[in-house]
Image: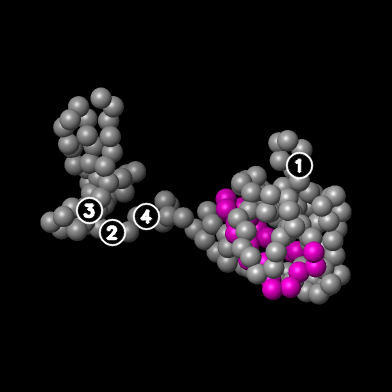
Amino acid sequence: MPAQIITGRNPNTNQPSVASVIDGVVQTNTTLGGADISDASPLPSSIQRYSNTVTATIANGAAVSGAIDFRPYTMLVVEMPVAWTAARLAIRASHDGVTFLPLYDDMGNLVRFNGGAAVAVGTAYVAPPEIAGVRFIQLWSEDGAGGNANQDNNRFIVCHLKA
């Protein structure tokens, strides 16, 4: 029988507990990844997930937002504004925050929100997983054929970033 790891709280002390079950024998542990969890202290910051919220602006007459430093993150959710000139929302990537290129997946498709369909106002979208590992990103108002779809007013897109 393979080893099993069980996590939970001690019913007598309400403190976190981790136990191993090896060959039917339960062995209680007081450390997790080298961190002492016997005193119910929070997990060390080195294993906590980091998050942040920023606003990306696509200016009136433009198609791309300013640079977003995506280095410590792997996930992104965007909240579309209540007004939007019809377009798709794609990703542009950069290693230096200055020169941006359209981001393509391993099949040669542009990386877009909403499966490549036009995005709707007042809707939240999860970014495709291909953005993980990109250093800087821009949100790109894209016409569906790889060209710019300029917005007819300033657009403020709330971005929830998660490590």
Q: Is residue 33 magenta?
A: no
Identify the disc placed on residue 41.
Answer: 2
Asked if the residue under mark 4 is in contact with the one under mark 2, i.e. CB atoms within 8 Å, the reply is no
Three-letter amino acid code of the residue under disc 3? Arg
Q: Looking at the image, which residue is at 84% across and 72% down?
A: 152
Q: Label 1 amino acid?
A: Asn
Q: Label 2 neighbourhood size at 10 Å, few (<14), some (14-19), many (20+)?
A: few
Q: Please give the residue where the numbered disc 4 appears in the rendered image.
A: 44
Whether residue 53 is visible here, answered yes or no, is yes
Q: How much space separates mark 3 and mark 1, taking CA atoms? A: 46 Å
- Spatial CA distance of label 3 from label 2 is 13 Å
Three-letter code, disc 2: Ser
Q: Position of residue 108 (x, y in %)?
A: 77, 38
> Spatial distance from mark 4 to mark 3, Cα to Cα?
18 Å
Q: Is residue 74 left or right of residue 60?
A: left
- Circle 3 is placed at which residue position? 9
**Amino acid type of disc 4?**
Pro
Discs 1/4, front: 1
